[in-house]
């Protein structure tokens, strides 16, 4: 399996200058390679191969001052990056999207470079851990968690964030194989995501949505200050970094919550069923698009999927159509406006929370898709969700996802 480990770098002022210089050389090489690609296509009527453009790198060093200062593998990955972008455009065209051509990268849009296979290592110097980068420097790094001993480090990507901070992301390959999902999962759960309650599952747990109102107010306040600064001035640059720090704070808190929540479900259950939502289409809707973007459902599902694969848990994404309208007990559909939060079936009289009813329908469809056998009676009949434990999102963020298992009176009172 392939894992990524991200750590914060602690470069000095001299290190920052060298990092920025290497980053800018890579950016200029990217733009030059794009120029050569278009020139080759005009002459020969077809795109050149990646090997053709990479073979030109030794000749470029003869007249390009500074290119020899960058490690050769880093220069090769810049060419590979261009062709990866071309593949991304081709996929968009195949899916029917109207796309243009690749453009030259300005400094603000080219923020990273990669050491692939060689030219980097973690070392101990002067009593601290440093990242040794060939032809660059030994940069102190904050290893807040250890990399497993059996991890084979394949590459490292050094990136400058808009806040001015530098991070190193290691790509590690593990020889271990992920466990196979069990043929007859015992602990199964269906999850319905929403705005008021972020997640409502079939075990009766409702996790509150992350409250980022204070962070958004701070971001809006700093953005208003930025609009009053003269563009290009020193004060403008300082304020721009404050705005970037607000964005980074929002992003970190949201991803921390999603990582902990997805990790809990992947480890505690044998099968997890969710809705296959068209989040992109929901974002294009004029109503409630901001809350939909803030919920980051697609990110949550992506994290949950790869963690289920890592833990040997079945992950099933089912068709979301009608999961809220159908009765989990008898299957009769009932129209319900969005503001109606309780499900009451006129056919069988079954009553439950609207999201709990949807979660049971999601689980039923997930079991059918996987082909897991279950009794003729519906799951909601065998385990009626009468009570719901409301878990505060603050507890999840502060102490981690295991708090979701604490079905205590204090959790309910929150």
Image (cartoon, rainbow, N blue to C red):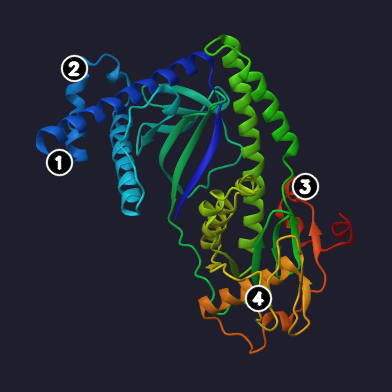
Q: Give the SS element for disc 4.
A: loop
Q: Nearer the viewer, mark 3 or mark 2?
A: 3
Whether label 3 touches label 2, CB < 8 Å: no
Q: Give the SS element for disc 1.
A: loop
Position above or below: 256 against 132 = below
Q: Give the SS element for disc 2.
A: helix
Label 3 or label 2, whichever comes before in sequence order: 2
Can residue 35 be seen?
Answer: yes
**Residue at position x 35%, y 35% from top?**
118
Give whichever of 254, 155 is nearer the camera: 254
Q: Position of residue 307 (x, y in %)?
A: 55, 58
Q: Which residue is mark 1?
A: 46
Label 1 or label 2, whichever comes before in sequence order: 1
Label 3 or label 4, whichever comes before in sequence order: 4
Q: Nearer the viewer, mark 3 or mark 4?
A: 4
Q: CA distance from mark 3 to mark 4?
A: 32 Å
Q: Which residue is mark 4?
A: 326
| Mark 2 surroundings: few (<14), some (14-19) or many (≥20) residues within 10 A | few
Drawn side of residue 36 relative to residue 117, left or right:
left
Whether label 1 touches label 2, CB < 8 Å: no
Q: Which residue is mark 2?
A: 62
């Amino acid at each position: 399996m392939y894992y990524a480990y991200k750590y914060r770098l602690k470069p000095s002022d001299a290190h920052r200058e060298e990092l920025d210089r290497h980053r800018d050389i890579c950016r200029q090489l990217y733009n030059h390679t794009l120029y050569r690609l278009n020139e080759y296509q005009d002459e020969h009527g077809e795109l050149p191969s990646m090997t053709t453009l990479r073979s030109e790198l030794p000749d470029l060093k003869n007249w390009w001052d500074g290119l020899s200062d960058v490690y050769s593998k880093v220069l090769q990955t810049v060419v590979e990056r261009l062709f990866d972008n071309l593949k991304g455009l081709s996929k968009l065209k195949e899916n029917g999207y109207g796309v243009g051509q690749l453009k030259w990268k300005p400094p603000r849009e080219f923020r990273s470079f990669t050491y692939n296979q060689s030219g980097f290592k973690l070392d101990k110097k002067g009593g601290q851990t440093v990242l040794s980068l060939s032809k660059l420097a030994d940069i102190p790094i904050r290893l807040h968690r250890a990399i497993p001993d059996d991890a084979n480090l394949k590459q490292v990507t050094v990136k400058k964030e808009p806040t001015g901070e530098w991070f190193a992301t290691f790509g590690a390959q593990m020889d271990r194989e992920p466990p196979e999902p069990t043929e007859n999962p015992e602990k199964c759960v269906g999850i319905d995501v929403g705005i008021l309650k972020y997640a409502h599952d079939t075990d009766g747990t409702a996790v509150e949505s992350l409250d980022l109102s204070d962070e958004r107010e701070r971001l809006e306040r700093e953005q208003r200050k930025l609009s009053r600064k003269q563009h290009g001035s020193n004060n403008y640059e300082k304020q721009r970094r404050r705005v970037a720090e607000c964005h980074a704070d929002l992003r970190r808190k949201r991803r921390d919550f999603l990582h902990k929540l997805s990790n809990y479900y992947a480890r505690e259950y044998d099968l997890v069923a969710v809705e296959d939502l068209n989040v992109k289409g929901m974002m294009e809707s004029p109503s409630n698009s901001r809350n939909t973007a803030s919920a980051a459902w697609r990110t949550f599902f992506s994290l949950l999927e790869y963690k289920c694969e890592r833990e040997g848990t079945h992950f099933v994404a089912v068709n979301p159509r009608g999961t809220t309208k159908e009765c989990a007990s008898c299957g009769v559909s009932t129209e319900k406006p969005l503001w109606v939060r309780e499900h009451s079936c006129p056919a069988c009289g079954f009553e439950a929370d609207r999201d709990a009813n949807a979660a049971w329908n999601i689980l039923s469809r997930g079991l059918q898709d996987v082909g897991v056998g279950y009794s003729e009676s519906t799951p909601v009949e065998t385990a009626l969700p009468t009570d719901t434990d409301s878990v505060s999102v603050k507890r999840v963020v502060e102490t981690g996802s295991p708090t979701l298992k604490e079905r205590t009176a204090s959790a309910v009172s929150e």
